Amino acid sequence: MSFAVDFSALAGQSCIVNALLYVALAIGVCKLTTLTLSYASLLLDVFVLPPVDFKTYGAKTGKWAVITGASDGIGKEYALQLAKRGMNVVLISRTQSKLDALAEEIELKYKVGTKTLAIDFAADKASNYESIAELLQSLPVTVLINNVGQSHSIPVPFVETSDEELRNIITINNTATLKTTQIVIPLIQSTLKQNKGTRGLILTMGSFGGLLPTPLLATYSGSKAFLQSWSSALAGELASDNIDVELVISYLVTSAMSKIRRTSATIPNPKAFVASVLKTVGRRCGAQERYATSTPFWSHAIMHWAIENTVGVYSKLANTLNLNMHLSIRKRALKKLAKGK
Ligand SMILES: NC(=O)c1ccc[n+]([C@@H]2O[C@H](COP(=O)([O-])OP(=O)(O)OC[C@H]3O[C@@H](n4cnc5c(N)ncnc54)[C@H](OP(=O)(O)O)[C@@H]3O)[C@@H](O)[C@H]2O)c1
């Protein structure tokens, strides 16, 4: 009430002040409305809308999903949960024994087909990609999960990053993802031509490390930011082919890579994380400001939305807080290494 009185008192002073106040008020109302709508959309995406039906992507009709980095952590869960939905699965990662055990578990539990391929993406050999192409050539593929990824073993200043770690991160996260996707896109296109009404799906694992420039994980951070632009660009290219392309953004998840074992409200296990991804495919969840991108786990979604709508992901404040967090992780990791743990 007092605001209304003050406002009208000010507005009465001159025409210019009057106009400026109305413009400011309109901008404020507009901004508040946008924020409210975007938060409401986040809540709808994450908590209210029904789970996506994978029949759209050919589940239970003999179609195949290809998953990289499939033998452990998040990738293993993608394989299990896609098989549970009725997709046949191609499992690609480094260790044949882990792939065999997972394939056996999946066939027994979900009665779907499996194929495995053990390759080391870090080697970046033409023969790796020839084996992928050969394995997939006769399969009706509709889904690709670009999950394989590597981070720094511990947070490290960029200048001290070893040549091997730097090359592996870029080769595995970027080169392998791009080359595998180039092999799979024509296969999805040809499957969709023969199966009108079915859609294709390419999900790529992003990270908060790519969402926020992350000091002491600079190479990993850059590699995941690269995937954001690449994946969104690809989404535009493939939209008219009925192929949904989406970058999936995640904060920490318990796994060998994160070296975190205990779950919490902000750190789910791979099972809960992947369930949130597959339930909400095609929706933005916490990534309301981004095309073809999703931050699906509920607490990650709220964190993403809150950062984006307050300090912003590229701000000095976000960078400094992130630096301090990773300095403290580095300190603890170095202490552990010194103790030989
Ligand atoms: N965990 C997190 O907190 C987190 C957060 C954000 C984003 N992500 C992203 O999520 C994805 C999966 O991470 P994760 O935590 O599930 O990792 P993870 O538990 O370490 O599992 C990695 C998987 O990739 C395979 N792999 C690793 N290096 C490989 C290589 N050179 N060639 C072929 N396969 C290789 C591993 O195979 P082997 O088992 O045979 O070694 C394993 O199956 C990554 O892209 C990561 O950046 C993770």
Image (cartoon, rainbow, N blue to C red):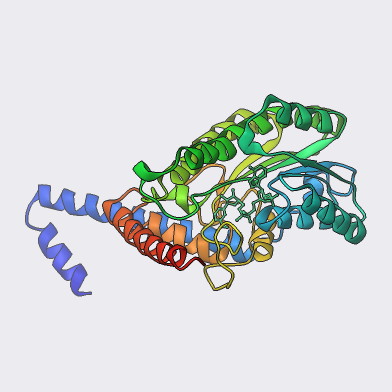
Query: Is residue 207 visible from the viewing direction of this image?
Result: yes
Q: Position of residue 150 (x, y in %)?
A: 56, 47
Query: Is residue 228 visible from the viewing direction of this image?
Result: no
Above or below, 307 against 144 in this view is below
Compare residues 231 and 58 and report the one nearer the observer.
231
- Left or right: where 194 falls relative to 170: right
Q: Picture quarter containing residue 277?
A: bottom right
Q: Position of residue 136 (x, y in %)?
A: 82, 33
Compare residues 338 and 115 and report the one nearer the observer.
338
Above or below, 239 against 97 in this view is above
Q: Picture quarter containing residue 179?
A: top right
For the point 89% across and 61% down, the residue is 109
For the point 61% across and 61% down, the residue is 255
Above or below, 303 against 145 in this view is below
For the point 55% across and 73% down, the residue is 264
Give the number of marks.
0
Q: Residue furthest left?
A: 13
Q: Position of residue 310 (x, y in %)?
A: 34, 58
- Left or right: where 44 falls relative to 126: left
Indicate the quadrant containing the N terminus: top left, top right, bottom left or bottom right.
bottom left
Q: Position of residue 125 (x, y in %)?
A: 66, 28
Compare residues 323 and 201 and report the one nearer the observer.
323
- Left or right: where 194 falls relative to 69: right
